[in-house]
């Protein structure tokens, strides 16, 4: 099994950490969707990270669909047996936080400065705060023992947002999430799967 994509993508990182937690061996090809476009496109012409190539050679995309596939072949699960709705809600909020952070990063880095649209950036920042405000209220639900998918996705999202847009989302505003992230990032699966 091969996981394609760089760990500075929160979607790639959540899959890599989940693979380790699920005990599924994999090879990691750290290709950039921007700098390695040609090599990436030879594996997946859509150049989307993460891409997972299964042992049967099937090319899968989208972290949530990849995780669904992995849950199906694993001997253990990262989804709770009960209160699955709550887990899905938290994962959705964390993924939205990732999406909104990506939108800010792309607007700031891919567009020339004079073409950046401030009202769009402001709208996205409001949405990003809305996601983290809800997650902060639910932070008591996060736990590293046992580490489940909602915990992984939340911790990965927070680290990603802090790395790229700490000027928009400050740890002081979301102290519980900052504390949870600090606990998660010292776990072996996180340390061996660094964002940078
Ligand atoms: N919903 C997708 C989002 C994946 C995504 O947007 N990945 C980015 C990298 S962080 C990417 O492939 N960007 C290049 C592109 O969209 O062309 C997932 O969960 O996997």
Image (cartoon, rainbow, N blue to C red):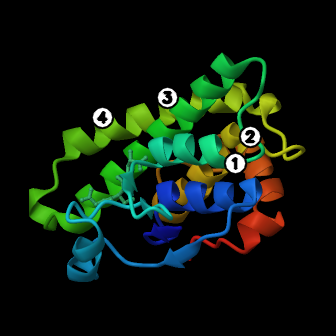
Which image quadrant for residue 196?
A: bottom right
Q: Mark 1 points at which residue?
A: 74
Front-most of residues 111 and 146: 146
Question: Can you tell which of label 3 and label 2 is closer to the viewer?
Answer: 2
**First in residue order: circle 1 vs circle 3:** 1
**First in residue order: circle 3 vs circle 4:** 4
Q: Name the residue under label 3.
A: 130
Front-most of residues 68 and 98: 68
Residue at 83% of width from left, 63% of height from top?
A: 187
Label 3: which secondary element = helix
Neighbour class for label 2 at 10 Å: few (<14), some, many (≥20)?
Answer: some
Question: Can you tell which of label 1 and label 3 is closer to the viewer?
Answer: 1
Q: Is residue 86 above or below residue 156?
A: above
Front-most of residues 126 and 47: 47
Residue at 16% of width from left, 63% of height from top?
A: 111
**First in residue order: circle 1 vs circle 4:** 1
The answer to whether the residue labelled 1 contacts the one labelled 3, judged by CB atoms less than 8 Å apart, is no
Is residue 90 in view from this perspective? yes
Q: Is residue 67 above or below residue 54?
A: above
Q: Name the residue under label 2.
A: 77
Horizontally, residue 48 falls left or right of residue 161, namely left
Q: Position of residue 14 (x, y in %)?
A: 59, 54
Question: Can you tell which of label 4 and label 2 is closer to the viewer?
Answer: 2
The answer to whether the residue labelled 1 contacts the one labelled 2, judged by CB atoms less than 8 Å apart, is yes
The answer to whether the residue labelled 3 contacts the one labelled 4, judged by CB atoms less than 8 Å apart, is no
Q: Mark 4 points at which residue?
A: 123
Estimate the spatial distance between the alpha carbons at disc 1 and disc 3, rounded to whole Å.
34 Å
The answer to whether the residue labelled 3 contacts the one labelled 2, judged by CB atoms less than 8 Å apart, is no
Neighbour class for label 1 at 10 Å: few (<14), some, many (≥20)?
Answer: few
**First in residue order: circle 3 vs circle 2:** 2
Residue at 24% of width from left, 56% of height from top?
A: 107
């Amino acid at each position: 099994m091969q996981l394609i994509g760089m760990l500075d993508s929160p979607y790639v990182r959540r899959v890599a950490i989940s693979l380790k937690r699920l005990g599924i061996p994999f090879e990691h090809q750290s290709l950039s969707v921007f700098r390695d476009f040609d090599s990436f496109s030879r594996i997946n012409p859509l150049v989307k990270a993460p891409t997972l190539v299964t042992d049967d050679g099937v090319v899968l995309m989208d972290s949530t669909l990849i995780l669904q596939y992995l849950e199906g072949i694993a001997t253990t699960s990262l989804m709770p047996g009960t209160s699955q709705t709550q887990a899905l809600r938290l994962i959705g909020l964390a993924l939205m936080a990732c999406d909104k952070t990506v939108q800010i990063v792309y607007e700031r880095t891919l567009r020339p400065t004079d073409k950046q649209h401030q009202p769009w950036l402001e709208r996205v920042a409001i949405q990003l705060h809305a996601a983290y405000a809800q997650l902060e209220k639910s932070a008591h639900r996060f736990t590293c023992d046992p580490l489940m998918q909602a915990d992984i996705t939340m911790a990965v999202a927070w680290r990603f947002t802090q790395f790229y847009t700490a000027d928009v989302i400050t740890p002081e505003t979301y102290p519980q999430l900052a504390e949870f992230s600090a606990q998660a990032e010292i776990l072996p699966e996180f340390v061996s799967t660094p964002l940078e």
